[in-house]
Structure formats: structure tokens, C-alpha cells
Image: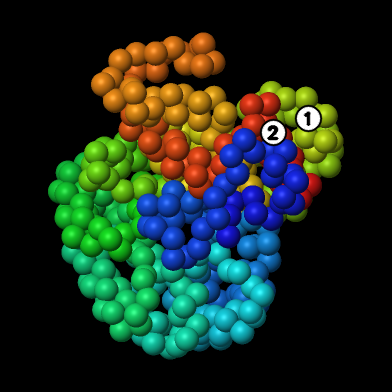
């Protein structure tokens, strides 16, 4: 699989200075964690789940979470498990199908080895598990169960803990909770692919819900948690982990996100013709702002609950030609001694030592999502995705 792999080769050639790399579920964890992109959540109870997975893979989705937790009723858990077993068997019987990276969000640690056993040979399609409401006390049993299931099944399985517990939100317990989370995930570092933020649960602790014209960063109590999570768990010194962006919960129920009418987005400030008569609906502005703020605050990838969110997240994840040029200049071997240089675009200072970690992360993102041509930006990437 590859990002934008659903586009024709000639279209990718026109869009990319460096195309996104191809990868599989067996690729190195460092690459997979950067390549998760828009991780699409789906209730595990969907009756045509295998068809949905194949369809979304054809539309550019590269990672999905099949949820047995908050997205389904407590009474439906057993039926959801049975449905997952059937749907994985269906998917495994389709030799031509290349599914995305598939993860199951469980409720209890005991579900992990049980599901791996029940999936049987179809477990080869499973990349891992999403661990809810993760703290050190609650999370270690999940990680131990995943390790045991991995050993029994003989296949690598990843964990994606979700940071969403009240202990993480409350000021008096936040630092202690974060320290415990770090101890747990550091001990199982090889199995932790990424950490996910559960902002909806954070808001619920205070009876809050952000409006569609606000981002998670406008809710100050949430923004403070994100900052502390990145501070303690997202460092670029080799001790950190990939931290993914929170869910954007709004979408249009009765109309398509990309409308054929000519409309203009205040966030983008572009002309209608640039989107080939399809401009972005105003309702998407909040999502675009939030993804940009995610990246500015050290987050990579995003939890998504609607297919219309996937393409914008991926288009905003592509590295610009200017970013790529700067990163390459900073990391040239002859710059190893440090120093300051003017960017090739002659519009900024590149300071070698302070910008090195940024440059390394940028080139990893470039490997996963590609580098746009000099005259290609978000609008062109989005338009090509809509047409494709």
C-alpha cells in the first residue's frame, strides 16, 4: 500500500516531486507510525465490514480501527466479536484484496488473546490493538496480553494506547499519570506504534463539546493536556513516541463534504476554478485548521470517524517542496558541524543544530506521504483526490 496509491501513476507523477513510498504491515515500525495518516474508525458490528474495508482501501485509507468499545452498545460486544471473526475470514478469502493496516479496539485485556485465537489464520490481517483509557495501572495488563498473543500467534502485533482518562486531565494527577504512562509504554516500546488522544472523553469530564468552528486547541483545558502529553511523551530525543491528533467529530449528514456548487473556504482563500468547480464546503474549515495545529504542536496522523475526512488529512500531510528543500539542506553531511544558512527559497534562516530534529521528522513524513512538486499545494492534491 501507499498514500495516494488510489490515484493513477501519471497523476502521481504530475503531483509529486518524490512519490510516497510503498509499505506493508511488515514494514519497520518507525515508518508505519509516520504513515498511519487518517485512521478511520468503524464499529465492529457493521454487517458488511469486509466490503467496507475493501472500499475504503480503494479510496486511499491505509489504517482502520474496528471498534468494540465506545462506538457500540454494551449489549452488542459479543455480537461484535462474532462479526469480526466472520468478516476477517471473509477478507482473508479475497486474494486480490489488500486491506489497510487493521487494528481492533478492545474493552478488556482478556479480549486480545481470545480474539487472536478465534481469528485463526485470518489473524495475519491484523496489525494490532487499540487500548482504551490507558494508564499505567490499567494499561500494563493490556500490553502483557498483547505480548502473550503475539508469542502464541507468531506474528508481530502493535499496541496503540488511547490517552483519555480523567486522571490525565485533572491537574492534581496529570504529571503522576503521565509518568506512569511513560513507564508502561517505554517498557514495551517495540510494541507501541503510536499514542492516540481521546479528546472527546476529556471534554466529557467537564460537560464540554467544541463547536464546528473551533478546534481542540481553542478549548484551553484540552490544549493544556495535549501540550503536556507532547512534552513528556513526544520528544524528539529518542525517548518519544508518535502522538496522533484528536478526532474531528463533525461531518455533513445530508450533503457531500465536497460540493459541486462554487463555494469558497475562508481558511484556504482560493478561487473556485482551482478546485475544478469543486470548492471545499465551509464546514471543513475547522478540520483543516485543527490538522494544521496538530502538526504545529508535534502531532502526526489523526483519528477520523468519517471517510470525507481522510483525503484532507492526507493532503495536508504531504511535505511541501520548500520544507523538503530546507530539510535536505539542514541534513547535508557537510553541515554536521552546525552553523546557519539561508534557505534555498531565500525566505528564512535554517539553523543546523536546532532544526535537525525537525528536518529528520520532515524527511520521514516525506517518505510516507511524498513531496509535492514546487507548483503543487494542498488544493491541487485535494482536487486530484476528488477526481481520482
Q: How far apart in space, not on screen, are marks 2 and 1 (Cα)?
A: 7 Å
Question: Dot 1: within a 10 Å radius of its alpha carbon, few (fewer than 14), some, or many (20 or more) residues?
Answer: few
Q: Position of residue 314 (x, y in %)?
A: 58, 45
On screen, residue 225 above or below 55: above
On screen, residue 153 above or below 318: below
| Mark 1 lies on residue | 274
| Mark 2 lies on residue | 379
Task: Count all numbered tags in the image, as a single digit.
Answer: 2
State the SS at label 2: helix
Q: Visible in this render: residue 30? A: yes
On screen, residue 377 above or below 229: above
Q: What residue is shown at x 24% (from left), y 39% (from top)? A: 237
Picture quadrant where residue 83 is located: bottom right
Q: What residue is shown at x 40% (from left), y 38% (from top)? A: 361
> Answer yes or no: do the residues labelled 2 and 1 have beta carbons within 8 Å?
yes
Q: What residue is shown at x 34% (from left), y 13% (from top)? A: 340
Q: Position of residue 220 (x, y in %)?
A: 37, 33
Q: Position of residue 39 (x, y in %)?
A: 51, 56
Q: Nearer the viewer, residue 97 or 77?
A: 97
Q: Quadrant of the N terminus?
A: bottom right
Q: Is residue 149 left or right of residue 116?
A: left
Q: What residue is shown at x 47% (from left), y 65% (from top)? A: 25
Q: Position of residue 189 (x, y in %)?
A: 25, 58
Amino acid at each position: 500500500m501507499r498514500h495516494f496509491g488510489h490515484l493513477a501513476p501519471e497523476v502521481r507523477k504530475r503531483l509529486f516531486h518524490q512519490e510516497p513510498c510503498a509499505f506493508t504491515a511488515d514494514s519497520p515500525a518507525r515508518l508505519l507510525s509516520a504513515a498511519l495518516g487518517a485512521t478511520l474508525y468503524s464499529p465492529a458490528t457493521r454487517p458488511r465490514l469486509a466490503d467496507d474495508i475493501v472500499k475504503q482501501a480503494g479510496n486511499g485509507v491505509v489504517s482502520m480501527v474496528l471498534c468494540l468499545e465506545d462506538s457500540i452498545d454494551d449489549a452488542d460486544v459479543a455480537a461484535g466479536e462474532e462479526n469480526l471473526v466472520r468478516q476477517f475470514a471473509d477478507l482473508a478469502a479475497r486474494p486480490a484484496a489488500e486491506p489497510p493496516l487493521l487494528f481492533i479496539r478492545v474493552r478488556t485485556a482478556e479480549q486480545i488473546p481470545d480474539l487472536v485465537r478465534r481469528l485463526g489464520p485470518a489473524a495475519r490481517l491484523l496489525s494490532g490493538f487499540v487500548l482504551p483509557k490507558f494508564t499505567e495501572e490499567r494499561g500494563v495488563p493490556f500490553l502483557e496480553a498483547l505480548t502473550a498473543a503475539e508469542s502464541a500467534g507468531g506474528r508481530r502485533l502493535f499496541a496503540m494506547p488511547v490517552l483519555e482518562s480523567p486522571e490525565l486531565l485533572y491537574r492534581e494527577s496529570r504529571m503522576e499519570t503521565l509518568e506512569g504512562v511513560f513507564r508502561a509504554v517505554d517498557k514495551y516500546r517495540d510494541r507501541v506504534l503510536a499514542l492516540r488522544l481521546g479528546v472527546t472523553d476529556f471534554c466529557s469530564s467537564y460537560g464540554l463539546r467544541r463547536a464546528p468552528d473551533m478546534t481542540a486547541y481553542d478549548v484551553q483545558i484540552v490544549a493544556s493536556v495535549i501540550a503536556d502529553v507532547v512534552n513528556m511523551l513526544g520528544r524528539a530525543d529518542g525517548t518519544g513516541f508518535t502522538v496522533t491528533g484528536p478526532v474531528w467529530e463533525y461531518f455533513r449528514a445530508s450533503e457531500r463534504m465536497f460540493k459541486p456548487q462554487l463555494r469558497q473556504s475562508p481558511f484556504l482563500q482560493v478561487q473556485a476554478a482551482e478546485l475544478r468547480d469543486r470548492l471545499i464546503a465551509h464546514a471543513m474549515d475547522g478540520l483543516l485548521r485543527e490538522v494544521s495545529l496538530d502538526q504545529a504542536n508535534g502531532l502526526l496522523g489523526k483519528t477520523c470517524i468519517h471517510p470525507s475526512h481522510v483525503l484532507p488529512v492526507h493532503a495536508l500531510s504531504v511535505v511541501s517542496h520548500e520544507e523538503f528543500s530546507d530539510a535536505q539542506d539542514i541534513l547535508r553531511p557537510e553541515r554536521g558541524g552546525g552553523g546557519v544558512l539561508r534557505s534555498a527559497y531565500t525566505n528564512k534562516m535554517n539553523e543546523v543544530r536546532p532544526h535537525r530534529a525537525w528536518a529528520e521528522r520532515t524527511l520521514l513524513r516525506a517518505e510516507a506521504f511524498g513531496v509535492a512538486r514546487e507548483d503543487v499545494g494542498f488544493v491541487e492534491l485535494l482536487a486530484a483526490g476528488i477526481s481520482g
